[in-house]
Amino acid sequence: MTLKVAIVGCGKIADGHVEEIQKMPDLAYVVGVCDLEPLMAEQLAMRYRIGAFASDLDQLLDEQRPDVVHITTPPGSHAAIAKRALDAGCHVFVEKPLTPTLAATKDLLEYAARSGRKLTIGYTYLFDPPAQDLRKLLAQGALGDVVHVESFYGYNLRGPYGSAILADPEHWVVKLPGQLLHNNLDHLLNKLLEFFEDDAPSVVARGLVRRSERFGDARDSMFDELRLVVTGKETTAYGTFSSFARPAGHFLRVYGTKNTAHVDFVSRTVTLEGASSSLPSAIGRLVPAFEMAARFARSGLTNALRFARSDFHFFSGLNYLFRRFYESIRDGTPPPISQRDIVRVATLLDSIFLQLGEAKEVAR
Amino acid sequence: MILVTGATGFLGSRIVDRLLHRGETNLRVLVRSSSSRQRLDEVVGGHPGAKVEVFVGSLGSKERAAEALDGCNVVVHAAAALSGAPADICLNTVVTTRNLLEAMVAQESKPTLVHISSFGVYGVACLPRATVVNERTQLETNPERRDTYSQAKLRQELLVWEYHGRHGLPVVILRPGVVYGPNGSAFSTRVGLNLFGLFLHLGGDNLLPITYVDNCAEAIALAAQSSDAVGEVYNVVDNDLVTAAEYLALYKREVKPLKSVRVPYVGMLALSALVERYHTFSKGQLPAIFTPYKTAVAWKGNRFDNGKLRRLGWAPIVGTQDGLARTFAYLRQKAS
């Protein structure tokens, strides 16, 4: 069975969704797209040669009868759209953050559970090749028990997303409870979860605004730097979101009792850091650099082979995630991301934005 | 009063200059809060006594467009996104134009729209080499095969025609070629592309359809003031053109040396066919930045007729030799 997919919300990320779905004709195809702004729906349909576009969701659901609806609208509208799609009997894929608050997230997840349809979320980096490679290392026991994790997410305010936000005082990101951070932190936090058993690890958050005042509106108070300390029963983690550190890195470091892994989501490399031999004196300081060079070379070679097999796409994680989601629908198995993990991320987000909100009050 | 959108831009700021030169005394410029006003301020500073009202706002909605429009009888619409993600280009070019058009037709006395389109709207890929493109040449019928800028400019112009037809909105459309000058970019893709430090010279002996920014602005200001222009379309391109090869040689001599390799048109066709084939084979692992269709549009070598604009009374105010000298002086200074 090939699933019929509809896309609701025709902004930038919708391109990535359509492109990846169009790479798996064995599993799914895009049957129509929808946006409140008909010109936006039209442009997406035109560029990807999609048969139908609409500005009315009910019309799209009635006419195209999709099996799956991908929701790529601003987060404030996710819950209402997802519920309409679930009511129409569709499975839903929702971009992150699922909703703007923990309460709304729990409500939507319960609604989805009652509908008997599947829901998943765009935690794309959990399915990126480096995350998959890390999981293999963990399964082999190469790291031992995990003691501590660092998750770093760099952001470029001058990139296409950042500049669009700064150019528009009415931009939906500016209006989210956690503004810029809110639209990105899911990516930083969801990678930590597999190292924590806790339902709600404690988090201490410190936000900073590094930009100077420029607009005289809500954009000026948007946090652009964030430091987190997350503490669970067995593990701890640091989280860093930075708009100014260069390069705008994106990595995870996993400190285990046997070894430490550096997982780079930009260069898609996974490298273990421990020296394999214990040579004495100055030689012991000389060899590790060559060992690391060899490990990076191996990682690069693996990537080159992936590239040669046409398995090195920009949105690789999204592709794997879609595939897993569609297979779960086809086979009647659980979706690729558990509801518990979605709630755990939303719990951390709520706590972080509560702390940052209080910090802002004090500053005033 | 004349409203100018995109007035802080490379072309828009010069349009303000030419309107003031041509005797307009009552201008309003629409400026987004995030835009740098340096170029505009320089222009206004050069016309002491001129009344230029700066309206900080956007075309983000019909209501906001209506605020900017209040009291204007002519709108020169030069605002458009030149780069960015495809959705943003559409949002900042097509949706904004629709908002402006909605606000204009809601006015009791409909203002005239002087719309800045582009040569990018023509459907030239299938025309024989060296065909002369005039205002009656058909528009692109395969926009999905074009770059996102051309897609947006085409959709934008079609919207303008739609509102003209449906609501009787008076419109003048100007379709400029490659607008060049100080503050502009060094190379149009019609000359070639910089590929990791090596310049692929793709335009060869094609005549570059260039227009010096002041000449283009003069054409727009003239059209804004001319009642004969209403309902008409004008190509905007200068009279004395240079070839891509001549431009590149002059650039190397006047600005700085550049490693370049000349790729003949057939060679580029073959290369772009390979790129397109690999794009399909790899399921889009690399983008189809070159395709034979895009190559035909950019480098096959069409010519563009400006006879209609000249008959309206336009003449270049800066010759190409002078225009290039000024542009290269700017680029030289920038490079140093």
Image (cartoon, coloured by chain):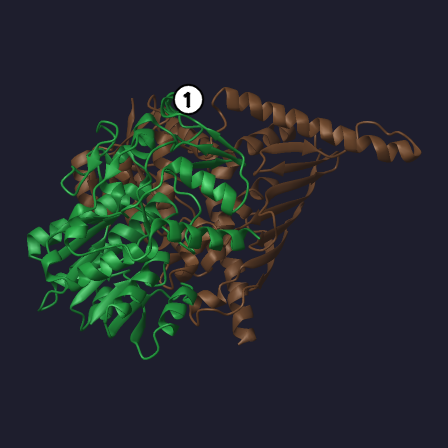
Evaluate whether residue B191 shows in this view. Answer: no
Q: Which residue does the image show at 93% across and 34% down from the upper left? A: A281
Indicate the amino acid at tag 1.
Tyr
Say whether residue B248 is left or right of residue A76: right
Q: Which residue does the image show at 8% across and 69% down from the upper left? A: B108
Q: Which residue does the image show at 45% across and 39% down from the upper left? A: B248
Evaluate whether residue A92 shows in this view. Answer: yes
Query: In the rendered image, which quarter contains the N terminus of chain B?
Result: bottom left
In front here: A69 or A262? A262
Give the image quarter of residue A163.
Answer: bottom left
Give the image quarter of residue B284.
Answer: top left
Residue assigned mark 1: B278
Q: Position of residue B168 (x, y in %)?
A: 6, 57
Vertical order, A72 against B113 (above or below): above
Give the image quarter of residue A300.
Answer: top right
Q: Position of residue B264 (x, y in %)?
A: 40, 25
Instruction: State which chain is coloured brown.
Output: A
Q: Position of residue A170 (x, y in %)?
A: 35, 62
In front here: A289 or B296? B296
Vertical order, B19 against B161 (above or below): below
How many marks do you count on the picture?
1
Vertical order, A346 against A276 (above or below): below
Q: Hey, which residue is sitting farthest bottom in the picture?
A: B49
Q: Secondary structure at mark 1?
A: helix
Say whether residue A144 is left or right of residue A224: right
Q: Which hue is chain B drawn in?
A: green
In front here: A221 or B39? B39
Q: Position of residue A302 (x, y in %)?
A: 60, 23
Q: Mark 1 packing: few (<14 Cα in 10 Å), some, or many (20+)?
A: some
Vertical order, A142 against A360 (above or below): above
Q: Which residue does the image show at 44% across and 65% down from the upper left? A: A219
Chain on which label 1 sits = B
